Image (tube, rainbow, N blue to C red):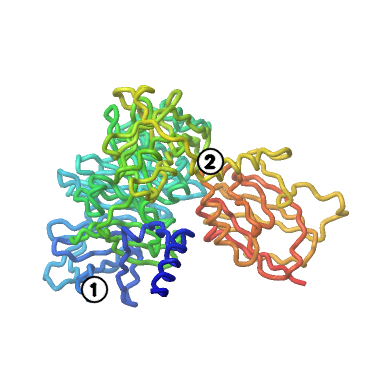
Amino acid sequence: MKKIFRSLTIAFSLAATGLWAQTPATENDYYQLRTLPIPQDAILEVGGMTVLPDGRLAVCTRRGEIWLIENPYQQQGTAPYFKRFAQGLHEPLGLTFRNGSFYTSNRGELTKITDEDGDGRADHYEAVTQLPIVGNYHEYSYGPLFDPNGDMLVTLNVGWVGYGASLTKWRGWLVKVSPDGKIEPISAGLRSPSSYMYNSSGDLFYSENQGDWVASGKVSQLKKGSFNGHGESLKWTSDPASPLKLTKEQLPDTGEPVATAGEKIPHYQYPACWFPHVLMGISTSDIIEDTKGNLGPHFKGQYFVGDQGHSKVMRMYLEKVDGEYQGACFPFREGWASGLLRLQWGLDGSLIGGMTSRGWSSTGKAPYAIQRLIWSGKTPFEMQEIHSKPDGFEIVFTKPVDPETAANPANYKISSFTYKYHHLYGSPIINAEESKIKGIKVAADGLSARVVLEGAFRKHYIYEIKPEGVKSADQESVLHPVGYYTLNAVAKGDLVTASQFTPFKATAAVHHHEMAEAKAETTKPGKTATKASSAKRVTEMPASWSAPDQVITVGTKPGLKFDVSEVQVQAGAKIKFIFNNNDDMTHNCVIVAPGAVDEVGMKAINLGLKGPDLQYVPASPKVLFHTNLLQPESTETIYFTAPSQPGDYTFVCTYPGHHTVMQGKLKVVK
C-alpha cells in the first residue's frame, strides 16, 4: 500500500510540474511520409509524373528517361518494381498519358511515345511539334496538359542571359498545340511556369517562381490574352497571332508597389494567391486539387502546392470575390527528401511527390526521391479557411475553438504588406503595416471567428493572419498559426456591430514577440531599421588602426556563388573586407563560426516579416561579422579583427534560400 501511495504521489508531482504534459502535435502526427526504394540503376531526377489507370506510376527524368513503377503503394510491405520504358529524351519536364500513349515536353519538342507491341517498352517516338528554342540552358518546356477539346497546353520558360530573356518566339508564354502540331499563343508574362492545372470548375492556374519581374512565388489564373507580369515575353505581341498588343514600354518599371502598378497595365492578371518568399517557400512548384478529401474531409476542395527549394507541401484555399479568385496559403508538410517538383494522387488516396535537386538546391538533401504522403485519419486543429468580409476576415477552424481565447483580440495579429514591381530580381517586403482589431465574433458552433478590423483595406495587398493565442475546445494550439491572404477585392455582406462581439476575459497575449523586439533593437540610438550598425558591421576603419594587415575582396557570380571559394587570414589580423555584389540578385555576406552555417541560415529564414529590416542577419553569437544586403552592382566594405582561434569559418549569403549553396571558406591560420 505504501508503494502504491508513493507511486501516486510521484505521478501527481510529475503532472503538477508539467513533466507529463501533453507533447505538442507535429505534422507527422497527422501526415506521414513513406519513401519508395529506388534501384541504383534508376537515377530518378523527376521531371514529370503521372498515375496510369491500372495504378502504375510513370516518371520521366531530367536525364531523358521514362520509368514505369509497379506497386508504388508498397502493398502489404512488398517492394515496388521499376522498369525503364523509354530513353533518349532531352530533359522532359512533364508527362501525360492519353489513349494508350505518353506525351512529354522536351526542351525543343513535344513528343508522343507509344508501346506498339505491348512489351512494356516504347517502340514509336513521334514529334507532335517542334517547340521554339535557341539552346539557352534556361529554356525549359513544361507539359503537356490536355484541354477539354483535346488540344495540348505547354508552358515555355524564358532563357537566361543575366536576366530572363525571350530569345525566340513565344518563350515566356502559355501556348496551345493542336493534334496536328499547330502552335497558338494564349497568355504572356510567364517566367518559370513549371506547373499548371485545371481545377474542378474548369479554370486554369499556374505557379510562378521569384525572379526578375516576379517579386515572390505566386499562383495565378491563366486566361487567353492575359499578362502575368514578366516583361520580356512582350517582344512578340506585334505578331498577328498574339492575343494581346501590350508592349514592354507600357510597363511601369519603377519599383512602385505591385498593388498599384498592376492597375496601370492593360490585361494584367493579379495573382490569386501570393506565396510570400521565404515566409512560405522559395520556389513554388506543382499544384493539385483535393476533390475527394484524400488528406482529410476538412481540406476537401482545397489545393496543395509544392515548393522545390524548401522541400515542402503548402496548402491553398481559394474563393471568388467579384468574379475573381483570391485566397490564402498555409504551411502544411515539411521534411520531404529532396526538391519537390511534381505531385500526383495515388489510386489509394496518397499524395505522391516526385523530387529532384540537381542544379536547383533544396533543403531536402537527397539528389532525387519519390515519397507518398498519407493522412493518419486524425484531424489537426488548423485554420481551415479564411474568407474576406466587408469589415475584416472570417477564420474557419477544423475544430471548435475555446470561446475565451478565440474572442480575445490580443490572441490575433494581422499585418499587411506588398512588393515592388520592377525588372530586378525579386523584391523586399514593402509597406508593412499592422492592422488594429476592433473585436471578434465567435460563431455559436465554435467553428469560426469573425475578426473585425479598423480602417480601410489595402487592395491587392497580402494579409498575414496569425491566431497564435487561440486554442481549441480541447486546449490544442493551432498546428500552423499563420496564413497569407491575397486580398484583390473586399467581399460584400453584412457588417458586425460592436454589440455582437463575443465577450471575453482579458488575458495576456500569446504572440511571439520577435518582431517587436527586432523593431526596438533596430531603432535604438545609432541604428536604423534598414542600415543596422553594430560591432559586427563596422564600415569605417577603426581609429586605432594605422592600416589593415590584409585586404580581402569577395564578389559574386551567377548561380548563387561567390567568385572565390576560399580565403586565408592570420589569426588576430586586422582585416579590410570588400564585398562586391556583381550579380543581378540581392546578397549579403555574413561570416559565421565553424559549423554554424545551417543554424544561422535557418534563423535568417525564420525572421519572417522583420527579415528585410534586419538585413536577414539573425541575432546570434555565431554571427561574427556581416555586411548589409546589397542590391545588384553595389559594394560595401567592413573592418574586423580576425578570430584568434584558428579554424575553418564560413562566409555565406543569408538571404533566404541562398545559404545552402552560396558559401565560401574563411580559413584562419596561426
Tag on residue 428? 2
Secondary structure under badge 2? loop
| Count of number-bearing discs | 2
Quadrant hosting residue 89: bottom left
Q: Quick one: label 1, few (<14), some, or many (20+) residues within 10 Å?
A: some
Viewer-nearest residue: 334 or 6: 6
Question: Residue 411's spot in the image, x, y percent?
Answer: 45, 39
- Circle 1 sits on which residue? 80
| Residue 77 picture location, percent across and down | 23, 75
The image shows residue 429 at horizontal and vertical percentages of 52, 39
The quadrant of the image that shows the C terminus is bottom right
Position of 62 compared to 66: left or right?
right
- Vertical comparison of 194 with 266: above or below: below
Residue 624 position by quadrant: bottom right
Badge 1 element: loop
Q: Which mark is residue 655?
A: none
In this image, 18 relative to 66: left or right? right
Q: Is residue 36 visible?
A: yes
**Residue at horizontal 49 percent and vertical 36 percent from the top:** 419
Q: Is residue 224 visible?
A: no
Where the N terminus falls, by quadrant?
A: bottom left
Residue 230 figure quarter: top left
Left or right side of 30 for 77: left
Q: Amino acid at mark 1?
A: Pro
Residue under the point 65% across and 45% down:
634
Q: Does label 1 or label 2 sit earlier along the sequence?
A: 1
Q: Pick the residue in front: 651 or 518.
A: 518
Depth order, front residue of 24/389? 24
| Kind of residue sitting beneath label 2 | Pro
Q: Nearer the viewer, residue 180 or 83?
A: 83
Q: Are marks 1 and 2 in contact (CB under 8 Å)?
A: no
The residue at 66%/65% (across/down) is 649
